[in-house]
Amino acid sequence: MRIITLNANGIRSAARKGFFEWMQEQDADLVCIQETKAQEHQLRDDPLYYPAGYHCFYEDATAKKGYSGVAIYCRRAPDEVIRGLGFDEFDPEGRYLEARFGNLSVASLYLPSGSSSEVRQAAKFRFHELYMTRLKSNRSDGRDYIVCGDWNTAHQNIDLKNWRGNQKNSGFLPEERAWLGELFSDAGYGDAFRVVNQEADQYTWWSNRGQAWAKNVGWRIDYQVVSGNLMDTVRSASIYKEQRFSDHAPLIMDYDYPL
């Protein structure tokens, strides 16, 4: 099973840069998109946004147009689609979409960023608290989970270039890193990428400032997080950088898991 995740920073912008043509060449079983920045009615008349061979699902932000939004494209029709997490504060921002296939749940998640203000950082921490409770409760439901998306936090020093200078910045705050640490330990989930790739300089997002892309001064903030029983199924991981569809790069992962 191959799964791709990408923060598109605008699905229409990524489309103009050739994302859908590239996607059709990847033989992916599922593609998870974050930051569509569109309402589905704006896309519905263009078959480009409903790629051939895929069942397509969009979860838009209703609180603010042209903001956030997630999507899932899947070759197999899901048994069920779950929209939102039941979080009244965050569901109107279009941050979660889950497709269920038998015992497997694959989700597209766009976790809040706190970089714009203290108000948004506080919101991010509230999301952390709510979502950790949900993730822990999911452990007892007997399902397998793969949560793909932009988690807006680098976990360890190896996961961003300038870690020393970013320890007081959103996305690498001690509290945020500790939350991921709990996720990858006590909560019982795993960072699938690190199962097969322990190398440095592996990033998925680059600032548009200061030639960050050209110098590979990046952050690894896009993950495929798996329930612990799936850790042994991870087979390969790659970050695609030959073309730029967004300020993020696609994360491509293969699993030894029948879909």
Image: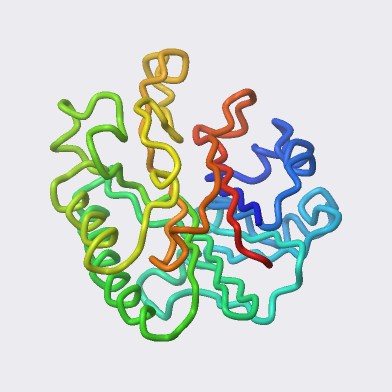
Which quarter of the rendering shows the N terminus?
Answer: bottom right
- Taking depth in this image into account, of 174 and 256 the one nearest to the observer is 256
> Which one is in front, 199 or 40?
199
Q: Position of residue 174 (x, y in %)?
A: 13, 47
Tell me what residue is drawn at x 28 percent, y 62 percent: 183
Image quadrant assignment for residue 26 = top right
Residue 216's spot in the image, x, y percent? 41, 19
Question: Would you say residue 9 is visible in this rendering?
Answer: no
On the picture, is 167 further left or further right than 21?
Answer: left
* Above or below, 119 relative to 55: above
In terms of image quadrants, where is residue 130? bottom left
Front one among 60 and 140 = 140
Q: Residue furthest front?
A: 232
Q: Position of residue 81 (x, y in %)?
A: 62, 77
Residue at 23%, 43% (x, y): give it.
170
Q: Taking 211 as reference, is 244 left or right?
A: right
* Quadrant (top left, top right, bottom left, bottom right) of the C terminus: bottom right
Q: Is residue 24 above or below residue 239?
A: below
Q: Residue 94 at what x, y percent from top left?
A: 50, 64
Give the residue at x 19% y 32%.
166
Q: Is residue 151 left or right of residue 167?
A: right
